[in-house]
Amino acid sequence: MGPGRSVPPTLMRAVGDVVATWREVAGQHALTANQIDRMASAFEHEDLAQATA
């Protein structure tokens, strides 16, 4: 990986699938709903949607 190199689609999908579970994982660590909502923009965005499509 590096500048000018593409990431294999299978790797993007695998990473996206794991990242998509972030709310569940955050809930397992005693975070409040408000704390979880405040973190959403770090995980829920266009790049994640494309990775898991």
Image (spheres, rainbow, N blue to C red):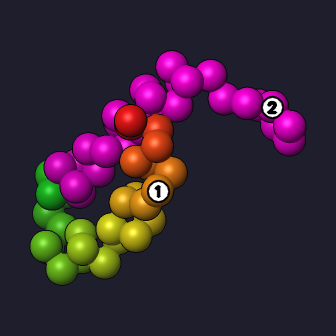
Front-most of residues 26 and 21 = 21
Asked if the residues shown at circle 1 and circle 2 are in contact, with their CB atoms under 8 angstroms apart, the answer is: no
Residue 32 colored in magenta in the image: no
Label 2 SS: loop
Q: CA distance from mark 1 to mark 2?
A: 20 Å
Q: Residue at x 29, y 50 (%)?
A: 22
Displayed quadrant of residue 44: bottom left
| Dot 1 or dot 2, earlier in sequence | 2
In x, y percent, where is residue 13? 44, 29
In the figure, is residue 52 to the left or right of 7? Answer: left
Q: Residue at x 13, y 73 (%)?
A: 33
Question: Which residue is disc 1 drawn over?
Answer: 46
Q: Residue at x 81, y 31 (%)?
A: 5
Label 1 SS: helix
- Count of residue discs: 2
Q: Dot 2 surroundings within 10 Å: few (below 14), some, or many (20 or more)?
A: few
Q: Quadrant of the N terminus?
A: top right
Front-most of residues 10 and 50 = 50
Closer to the camera: disc 1 or disc 2? 1
Mark on residue 8?
A: none
Type of the residue with mark 2:
Arg
In x, y percent, where is residue 11? 53, 24
Residue extent of the magenta highlight: 1-26
Mark on residue 5?
A: 2
Type of the residue with mark 1:
Glu
